Image (cartoon, rainbow, N blue to C red):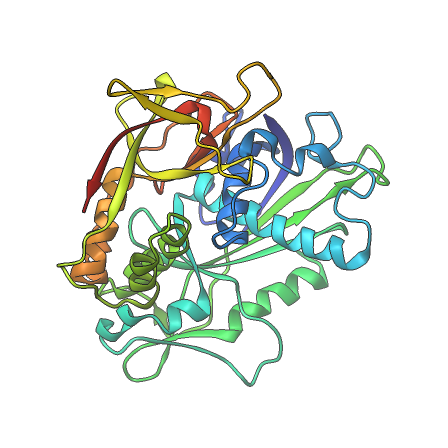
Amino acid sequence: MQKSVKLALNKFPAVPPSLEDPAKPGSAVPEIMVDLADLYHHYYLQSFDIAPPDPDPAHFEHVRLLEPTTPFRFQHNGLGANKTKKQNNSNELGEAFCRWFLDRHLDISHVARIEDVRDHGALTVAHGVSVEKDTTEDGDAPDYFCVGSSGEVSLAEAKGTISSVGFNTVKFAKWRKQFDRVRVLDPSGAPMSVKGYIVAMRWAVHTHSDKIFTKLSAEDPQTPGERQFFDESGAFSTAVRSLHYAPSLAKLRQPVLSAALRTGTLVSGELGFSITIWECLLPTMKGLRFVGGYFPSDHSGILPFDFENGKVIMQPKHPFRLDQASGTFFGIEEKVFRRLVDTSRQGPEVLREFSRPERMTTGYSGVSYLPDGHILGQIELFSPVATDVV
């Protein structure tokens, strides 16, 4: 399922190719389409630790809170029934939209919280580069450090609000100041300028007039500094990539791998990790294999599969009922997972040269596959094919 949101860009050196208006070369399109399964996937990755997705991307929780129209617009109390709930939901969904936008249109698939990157073990080989927050300035710093497909490091700040957002408003000026509160320092302690992005969502709700739409406003600012930051050692990108996958490894019941990537430390090569390898049954996913498992819809944990004469068969708990779902599959593309295992044994520098899976469209709203290798979808569309110890 897709919804539309309006788009505004500011201070971008060039319009990203996927956002360029074919009718007006050099200008951005006035609105973009958002796949709700992919949006929920980002929401789940950044909002939850080891908790199961509830619901799966085929029933994204915000779908039932949106009006039944193509524009992304909330029904009555769609963001929450009280002020605190509305603010929390607005911020969380704003972060999900930020991650979705970075991934889908700016080729930035890996993100990590600033404080986690600052303390990560990979920075010990960063040639003296360090991160600090400016304590002389009041207020928050940006949300994320990010890494694009080319290895370029950037910052990102996500916002969500139901009030008007404009690039010339006091509110946007306040958000820009957040980039002054984080500094990347060279070995001599001099600050270096880091490219950054502000992604602000203005929500349309049922009380707004029909002329008001949900709008994504993105700006491309930079932090102040004496020279442009260049990740010469690759330590920054490896720290961000390691931290990006650490929570997902915890979801896959691989706590040792997760801890190694979260801290930038090593595990013994003698320790093996048991995995189950799955295939997706969608034709568009043919040839890909995933390391993962499923969260049952029935929390008693009824297995939707069984083995009979060496074959895997579907075995639903209530075969006569058509309203029973078996669960939600969560996994990471097999080659990416094995690369993460190598990282845990050899060190974060393994991720310096990182080849992402090809961006693919599943062709089905019940499955979301992201370019970083994460996949999420209905368990009925996946089949276990092998077990292994890596």
Q: Position of residue 255 (x, y in %)?
A: 35, 58
The residue shown at (68%, 51%) is: 89
Q: Nearer the viewer, residue 130 or 174?
A: 130
**Quadrant of the image occupied by residue 5:** top right
Q: Nearer the viewer, residue 255 or 150?
A: 255
Q: Position of residue 14 (x, y in %)?
A: 45, 44
Looking at the rendering, in which quadrant would you find the N terminus? top right
State whether residue 310 is above or below residue 193: above
Q: Position of residue 55 (x, y in %)?
A: 59, 37
Q: Position of residue 334 (x, y in %)?
A: 26, 38
Camera sees residue 66: yes
Count of numbered tags: 0
Q: Is residue 30 left or right of residue 252?
A: right
Which residue is farthest top? 320
The residue shown at (30%, 75%) is: 129
Q: Is residue 170 left or right of residue 182?
A: right
Camera sees residue 354: no
**Quadrant of the image occupied by residue 372:** top left
